[in-house]
Amino acid sequence: MTDITYNNHTEDTSFGSGDFIPFWKTASGAARKINRANLITSLKETRVTTIASSGTIQPDIATTDTYIVTALAGNASVLAPTGTPSDAQKFILRIRDNGAARTLSWASIYRGVGQGLPAATAASKLMYMGFIYNSTDNKWDMIAYSQEI
């Protein structure tokens, strides 16, 4: 296969299509190739933790991007996540109760931005909360909230 030039950069097509992904090389001939397996494993996948119910909801943000409670069977306290957060780290909390509305209490590390933290679930309705970590204030800011109609 012949190299193809685009805007003064040349696509290096000499790499085997089964083993490597071609990258651009400059006019000086500098080029890099990366093994596909390494590329795939280096991409961040969403890390999901799912529980049925617990009186304490406590995501581990070192291992979880989305924390799902599928059938909350009693009132719950949302505790500060375990793990060490980084500035602007995000996580999603998804909760559905088991058919009866449940109250939620929140650790002080959480705060609503633009709206308050939800105080309760709505019976059998799915709710999502999106949080982003603010290292300046040491808070998990809820920047998104949505509940099933």
Image (tube, rainbow, N blue to C red):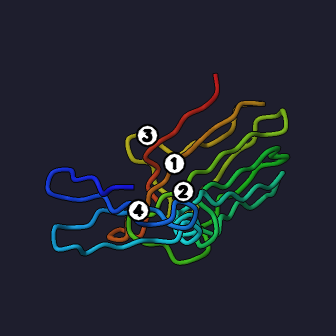
Q: Where does the image place residue 75, in percent across and percent down from the top left? A: 77, 49
Q: SS of the residue at dot 4?
A: loop
Q: Is residue 4 left or right of residue 96?
A: left
**Image quadrant where one finds the N terminus:** bottom left
> Circle 1: is it few (<14), some (14-19), or many (20+) Cα within 10 Å?
some
Name which of mark 1 and mark 4 comes first in the sequence: 4
Marks 1 & 4, CB-CB < 8 Å contact = no
Name which of mark 3 and mark 1 comes first in the sequence: 3
The residue closer to the viewer here, 56 or 22, is: 22
Q: Quadrant of residue 8?
A: bottom left
Q: Where does the image place residue 2, in percent across and percent down from the top left? A: 33, 55
> Circle 2: is it few (<14), some (14-19), or many (20+) Cα within 10 Å?
many
Q: Is residue 125 left or right of residue 118?
A: right
Amino acid marked by disc 2 = Phe
Where is mark 4, residue-wise?
22
Label disc, if present, on residue 130 of the rendered structure: 1
Name which of mark 4 and mark 2 comes first in the sequence: 4
Label disc, if present, on residue 115 of the rendered structure: 3
Marks 4 & 3, CB-CB < 8 Å contact = no
Marks 1 & 2, CB-CB < 8 Å contact = yes
Where is mark 2, residue-wise?
91
Name which of mark 3 and mark 2 comes first in the sequence: 2
Q: Where does the image place residue 140, in percent across and percent down from the top left? A: 47, 60
Marks 3 & 1, CB-CB < 8 Å contact = no
